[in-house]
Image (cartoon, grey):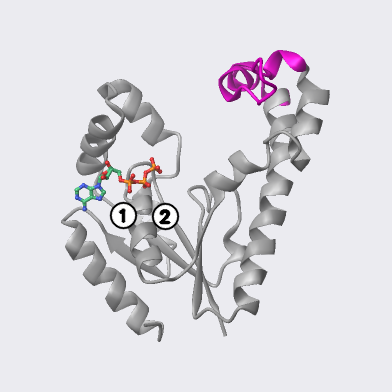
């Protein structure tokens, strides 16, 4: 039996860092953000629908989707944003499930669905265990500003746009506190996986 683990957290809490630990253990990781970029590539299912809905103004010269322009078009308009999500989200979900089932068939011990907005998008039923990567607020802000070279206000606003990571931790089956060192977080991950009878 393959254990399906949902990996989530908040912006800059350390999800990618923990996802890499899973990959290093040869546990496959399905990356929702990557898939949401894949499904809008020319020739892929969501691409045509987006062009039909929003027009060629959202394309780059070479025909690729211009994500920045599209972002601008939907940013200020909730109806359009919903329209876009209505096109993209089902395709992303479909692809995540397809890959999840593939890994199950291959009888991996575990498969990880890396979904930053697992709670916000109500995808908790897609997984069996929820693992939240937590970090305290001060460290989160510092790491976000450092990584993205962004100002305090901008970083605070992006953090506020998601459910607070403390709240997510309360809804998790297991929590990694990534406020300390990466080595410390790896130790916590190993302990959690032992508890789930993996590796
Ligand atoms: N334990 C740690 N100690 C020091 N720095 C860390 C630690 N964990 C992560 N970082 C750094 O903090 C930043 C955020 O980590 P990471 O990119 O893994 O977060 P994330 O949750 O995937 O973020 P996002 O959702 O924004 O993509 C990165 O620059 C990363 O190198």
Q: Please indicate whether residue 57 sits to the left or right of residue 53 in the image.
A: left
Residue 60 in magenta stretch: yes
Q: What mark, if any, has residue 134 been given in the picture?
A: 1
Q: Counting other residues with Cα less than 10 Å from the Cα at mark 1, is it few (<14), some (14-19), or many (20 or more)? A: many
Q: Please indicate whether residue 149 sits to the left or right of residue 111 in the image.
A: left
* Numbered range of the magenta stretch: 56-79
User: Mark 1 touching mark 2, by CB under 8 A?
Assistant: yes
Q: Which residue is mark 2?
A: 168
Q: Secondary structure at mark 2?
A: helix
- Is residue 190 depicted above or below 122 in this figure? below
- Is residue 163 depicted above or below 17 in this figure? above
How far apart are labels 1 and 2 at the CA level? 8 Å
Image quadrant assignment for residue 186: bottom left
- From the viewer's side, name the closer residue of 15 and 44: 44
Q: Please indicate whether residue 56 sits to the left or right of residue 175 in the image.
A: right
Which residue corresponds to the image point at 22% horizontal and 71% vertical from the top-left? 187
Q: Position of residue 13 (x, y in %)?
A: 32, 48
Q: What mark, if any, has residue 197 been given in the picture?
A: none
Which tag is nearer the camera, tag 1 or tag 2?
1
- From the viewer's side, name the closer residue of 185 and 103: 103
Which residue corresponds to the image point at 70% horizontal and 40% vertical from the top-left? 88
């Amino acid at each position: 039996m393959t254990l399906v683990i949902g990996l989530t957290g908040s912006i800059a809490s350390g999800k990618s860092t923990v996802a890499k630990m899973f990959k290093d253990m040869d546990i496959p990781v399905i990356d929702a953000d990557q898939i949401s970029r894949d499904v809008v590539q020319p020739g892929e299912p969501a691409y045509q629908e987006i062009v039909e809905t929003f027009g060629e103004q959202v394309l780059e010269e070479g025909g690729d989707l211009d994500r920045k322009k599209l972002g601008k078009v939907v940013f200020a308009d909730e109806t359009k944003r919903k329209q876009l999500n209505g096109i993209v989200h089902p395709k992303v979900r479909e692809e995540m499930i397809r890959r999840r089932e593939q890994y199950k068939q291959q009888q991996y011990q575990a498969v990880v669905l890396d979904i930053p907005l697992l709670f916000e998008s109500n995808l908790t039923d897609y997984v069996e265990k929820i693992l939240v990567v937590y970090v305290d607020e001060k460290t989160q802000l510092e790491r976000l500003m450092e990584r993205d070279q962004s100002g305090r206000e901008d970083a605070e606003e992006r953090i506020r746009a998601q459910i607070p990571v403390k709240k997510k931790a309360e809804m998790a089956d297991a929590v990694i506190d990534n406020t300390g060192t990466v080595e410390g977080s790896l130790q916590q991950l190993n302990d959690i996986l032992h508890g789930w009878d993996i590796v």
